[in-house]
Image (spheres, coloured by chain):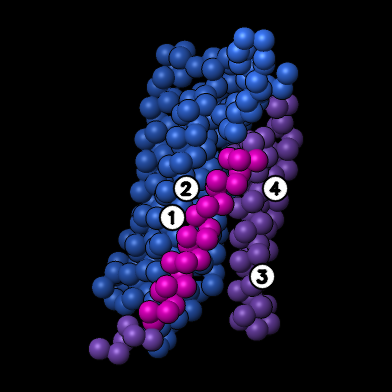
Amino acid sequence: MDNDQKRTYLYNAMWLTILTIMELGINHLTTEKSIQVLLLLAFAITKMILVATIYMHLRYETKMLRRILFIPIPAAILFGWALIYDLPFRWAI
Amino acid sequence: MNNNVKGIKNMNDTIAIRDPFGKATTGKLGMWLFIIMDGLSFGGLLIGGAALRVAAPSWPNPGEILNIPLTGFNTFLLICTSFTMVMALNSLEKRSQSGLKKYLALTMVGGIVFLGIQVYEYYHFFMDGFIPETSIYAAVFYSTTCFHGLHVLSGVIYIACVLYAANQGRYTADDTDHIEILGLFWHFVDLIWIFVFTVIYLI
């Protein structure tokens, strides 16, 4: 790993700030709510990837470790699907 | 031979075994494992909140209740603390003990200010009658942001302990593992906030 990465870290912080400001601006757009939600989620995921790869140094880790970190995602999707399946029954009692 | 490859000599043969985790230490792998589990906890809260939102007959617009500009500033503050945390590690790698202490202290102060702003926000909500019992929306808001706030508090205490050890001269450029592990935790807290801010405050 390069010993002096100050510039990369600083640029990353700047991009994160710019993306946050853009997120705040999305709420003021006159587009449909669904498009706003998609844009906001895309921006949030981009910011999370920037933090994980650059600040958490995930790009320097092995492929195996990076793959293991994605295990919770299918688990979360399964949990979400189970909850959505349960929703029609929830308020029926 | 690659750094990730360990050679085992067995009689005349050499068997190369590739370490699947490279140079990551046990402590670092432990923190990654904790992050996976903690991420699932946050996932449970956020997905549960989303399911309640889908099921609810009406859901308020967050902008009408929450102070989004103030929380936007808090998000910016947490991004800044991620920068100072990674600079603490960078300073240690460059053998700068003063830089390590300075950036750790700045990160800790940033975390305390973040918590202070969150408490200020809660105080005003309570004064306005927006309490967890008010609605499902309020319950989702408080459970998610309080859970994250507890992580920030844990991080601040963790940084204080590491800063105390750094003042004793415990960390050197040859052993940056402790600072890397602390950094992983703090960046995870930042990473989760990015998603919580979007889901709870903006959507």
Q: Which residue is mark 4?
A: A14
Tell which tag, 2 or 3, sits nearer the viewer.
2
Write down which chain is painted purple.
A
Write down which chain is painted blue.
B
Q: In the depicted view, which residue is nearer to us: B88 or B182?
A: B182
Q: Earlier in the sequence, mark 3 or mark 4?
A: 4
**Span of residues in magenta:** A63-87
Real-space Cα distance between discs 1 and 4? 29 Å
Asked whether the residues under marks 2 and 3 belong to the same chain, the reply is no
Query: Residue at 50% of width from left, 31% of height from top?
Result: B28
Q: Which residue is mark 2?
A: B36
SS class, disc 2: helix
Asked whether the residues under marks 2 and 4 belong to the same chain, the reply is no
Residue type beneath disc 4: Met
Asked whether the residues under marks 1 and 4 belong to the same chain, the reply is no
Q: Which residue is mark 3?
A: A39
Disc 3 packing (10 Å; few <14; some 14–19; many ≥20):
some
Query: Residue at 66% of width from left, 56% of height from top?
Result: A46
- Occupied quadrant, residue B123: bottom left
Does the CB distance between marks 2 and 1 fall below 8 Å? yes
Does the CB distance between marks 1 and 4 fall below 8 Å? no
